[in-house]
Image (cartoon, coloured by chain):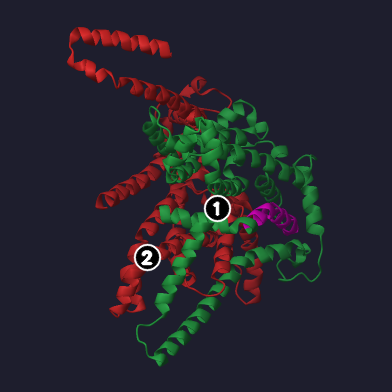
Amino acid sequence: MDEILKEEENVEDVSFVEEETPAQPAPVSKKKGVNHKLVTDIIVTVALALGSVVMLLPFIWMVLATFKPYDQINTTFFPRTWTGEGYKEMWETCNVITRNTGGIMRGFLNSLITTVPVVIIQIIVSAFAAYAFAKLEFVGKNVIFLVMLGTMMIPFSVIMLPQAWLFGRLQLTKGPLAVIIPKFFGSITTVFFLRQFFYSIPDSISEAARLDGAGYTRTFLSVLLPLVMPALATQGILSFIGNWNDYLGPLLFIRNQEWFTLPLLVDKLNSDGGSLEFVPRVLAASLVSLIPIIIVFAVFQKKIIGSIVFSAVKG
Amino acid sequence: MEELRNTYSEAETAELFATGDSEVVLEAPQQPKRKKRGLKHVENLIGWVYISPMIIGILVFTAIPLIMSIMAMFYDWIPTKMLWDSKFVGMQNFKDIFGGLEAEYYWEAIGNTFIFVIQLPIGLILGMFLALAMNRDMRGVQAFRVIYYLPGVMSVVAVSIIWQKLFDSSETGTINTFLMKMGASHIEFMNNKGWITFVVTLLLVWKGVGYTTLMFIAGLQSVSTDQLEAARIDGANAWVILIKITMPALYPIIFYLFVTGLMGALQMFNEPYILLGNRAWFMETAVGFVYRQFNDGFLGLASVGAWVLAIFIFIVTAIQMYVDKKKQEAE
């Protein structure tokens, strides 16, 4: 992934050099060209910086608002008096919502339970399937792959109702299992993505391992899997972000407030109180629910952005 | 196993001897081929084992619900009953959606969904300008890419709540307080479809533009530098290069973003639903309608609503597949 990124940067560098070196050798015009580039750079940077302010302003406003007393929410941008009251109220109200089972921390735990095992198992299952589709020959392979691609076309809104009904019948909506179990069976998009990676590995590598006496599973686990580890990690991170932020799925499949994930908990807190007094605690809860995502994004932003560049090139 | 095979081949050989002699020569290299087929058998089994979790998942969590939702369209299915114990109502659910009691709400919801699609072209145009600005060799572009993409990874609940508080309809709302300070009158943002569309569009563009920009940057970097160089030597100015070389190179990405964006937009639910809060019915999306019917216990009606929406999505998918096929044929 990093290599792809680096390559991209190189390409960019080259194009820039070509762009900004005029064909005329005259030194005067060259100097003029450089100045022209500098001026454009400054204008573009200023414009992008202004845009960045717009992009970040809602977040900054939110962070500051959590530290304000409610009557200052809309009257000042910076708090005149700093207070932790919003966080205290958020803590107490969340405790009420989760029926004293841990409040916002319970929400954290629920989100972790419905995210981390799901991501790990989903990626492993998907990797096995992707390997099978890319490197093994078996009866019906192409038909099954086409069927799987076909299921990607089915909108979630069609199958979510019977699913929700089924999980309700099985009493799974009282806990987190209805969100967790369906995702244990792999993700088709991940299979599709990883299959491309397995294709790019030459057959000679796995054949060499097989000649050394390794079975299919050994070959896969000890030879091929390490090679696609970066891709697996990227898919895992993207899957984590998606699952952590998911709203409609948990909304349908978790009907017990004790098991509300963070988005559901924040949403419930918000819909319970619409008045101005509730704003600091709602925003405090929103901010807390964003912290894990902010950390993951800060650590892996290169990988995340690289994967988008990769998908654009593929698409 | 090995023994069995040997006996078989012996018998076969004997048979071949009996029928004709020219075939016998061909029999000799058969042995290694047999062995390979044995290996193939293992590979076949392993392949199926590896994909079996996915097949089970698709059967249980896609195929069965799919069949149930098709059946549900013809039943007055209520959540406390099994589907097959519910009352069979024939085309009644369809009549409700196409011209009956729920028709007004459903088609308004479909209309609202299409109104919200306006964010798509706006986001694409803005994303392209940003990509052109960021696809330069200058200090800080990497940081800009991260900043513009940041809202995209944030929880939809959290960001929708931020925008809900900012655009609160009351006079004490943040934007309204600001407007009144500036001497303007306050706006009831959540009481007017135009303003709701405005706020939702703003939210969606703000959240999605970073992704669009990154896709376009990747596209811009795939533009052949030789071609650019040749155009420059021919004396083409920046504008001509943009229209004649850069834009055509971006068409596949524009098409991809538009199609996937449209499929997502047709299934929109989260942003308007959270933003409007307890007034979600005021400007409901199609999925919002389905969700409300489900919550009220009308599963049959909800299924018809979901399938009619699905048809719109299938049409978009079909167009995409057709264009992709054309493209492949051209290559």
Residue B123 on image: x %, y %: 46, 62
The vertical placement of B134 against B261, above or below, is below
Question: For numbered disc 2, what is the local secondary structure?
Answer: loop
The prevailing secondary structure element of the residues shown in magenta is: helix
Could you tell me which residue is drawn at 37 percent across and 23 percent down?
B37
Separation of residues labelled 1 and 2 (CA atoms): 38 Å
Along the line of sight, the residue nearer the viewer: A175 or A225: A225
For mark 2, what is the residue?
B223
Nearer the camera: disc 1 or disc 2: 2
Q: Earlier in the sequence, mark 1 or mark 2?
A: 2
| Both marks 1 and 2 on one chain | yes
The vertical placement of B196 against A120, above or below, is below
Along the line of sight, the residue nearer the viewer: B107 or A284: A284
Question: What is the chain letter for disc 2?
Answer: B
Q: Which quadrant of the view contains residue A55?
A: bottom right
Inspect this view and state whether residue A237 appears: yes
Along the line of sight, the residue nearer the viewer: A123 or A283: A123
* The label number, if any, that marks residue B33 in the structure image: none
Question: What is the chain letter for disc 1?
Answer: B
Colour in which the image shows chain A: green
Residue A111 on image: x %, y %: 68, 43
What amino acid does circle 2 point to? Val
Residue B206 on image: x %, y %: 54, 62
Read off the magenta span: A276-297
Q: How many marks?
A: 2
Left or right of A72 on screen, residue B163? left
The red one among the chains is: B
Residue B147 on image: x %, y %: 58, 65
For mark 1, what is the residue?
B272
Alpha-carbon neighbours of circle 1 within 10 Å: few (<14), some, or many (≥20)? Answer: many
Q: Which quadrant of the view contains residue A19?
A: bottom left
Alpha-carbon neighbours of circle 2 within 10 Å: few (<14), some, or many (≥20)? Answer: some
